[in-house]
Amino acid sequence: MTFKEQVLKLLNDGLTDKPEVFLIDLSISDTYKIIVTLDGDNGVNLQDCIDISRVIENNLDREEHDFSLEVASVGVGSPLKLIRQYKKNVGRTLIVKTANETIEAELVDANDEKIVLSWMAREPKKIGKGKETVQKTQEIPYSEIKEAVVTVNFN
């Protein structure tokens, strides 16, 4: 079993005890620097990171590989990578980039195939001059999303 396979097995064992927490990214450098990035259905707290760190660290042999380990939650402003992340962020505002456009809108639904965004836009009136505010909705399949980030509102 390679070092990465060993780490991944320990990580999956640790996550089995925490079904609400899930892996976003695992990277291991040539110098055995292990970086684990987690997210959770209700966020990730410090204890979650400590628990996962202990599961990995306590079951690897430093005599065999001198490693360093970093376990952290996904950062604010990090792009969404998994469908599970979209589902947990329903009701929040996203900036979604596709090949053709960038949309900042509320994520109103997310299923296994697509997301649904909703926002208010100013458009020319159908009859007469001027503009009117209209409610817009757009479905975007995950395959068309280049990047999606949750916006942080400090109001």
Image (cartoon, rainbow, N blue to C red):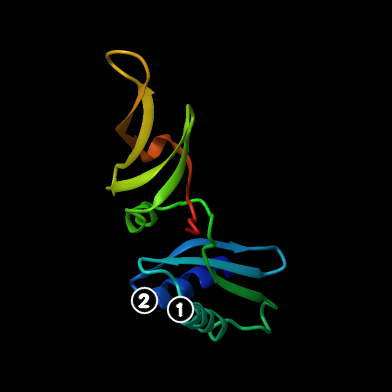
Please, what is the three-letter code of the amino acid marked with disc 2?
Answer: Lys
Please, what is the three-letter code of the amino acid marked with disc 1?
Answer: Asp
User: What residue would you read off at disc 1?
Assistant: 48
Q: Is residue 65 left or right of residue 139?
A: right
Q: Is residue 31 left or right of residue 102?
A: right
Mark 2 secondary-structure assignment: loop
Q: Nearer the viewer, residue 136 or 66?
A: 136
Q: Splitting the image into 4 quarters, where does residue 70 fall?
A: bottom right
Mark 1 secondary-structure assignment: helix
Q: Residue at x 51, y 51 (%)?
A: 79
Q: Nearer the viewer, residue 136 or 18?
A: 136
Between disc 1 and disc 2, the foreground one is 1
Q: Splitting the image into 4 quarters, where does residue 43 fall?
A: bottom left
Q: Residue at x 34, y 47 (%)?
A: 107
Residue 2 seen by the camera: no
Please tell me whether residue 141 is drawn above or below residue 76 in the rendered image. above
Q: Residue at x 53, y 79 (%)?
A: 53
Q: Residue at x 32, y 19 (%)?
A: 125
Q: Position of residue 30 (x, y in %)?
A: 70, 63
Density class for disc 1 (Cα within 10 Å; few <14, some 14-19, many ≥20) is many
Q: Nearer the viewer, residue 126 or 12?
A: 126
**Distance CA(mark 1)–CA(mark 2):** 8 Å
User: What residue would you read off at disc 2?
Assistant: 18
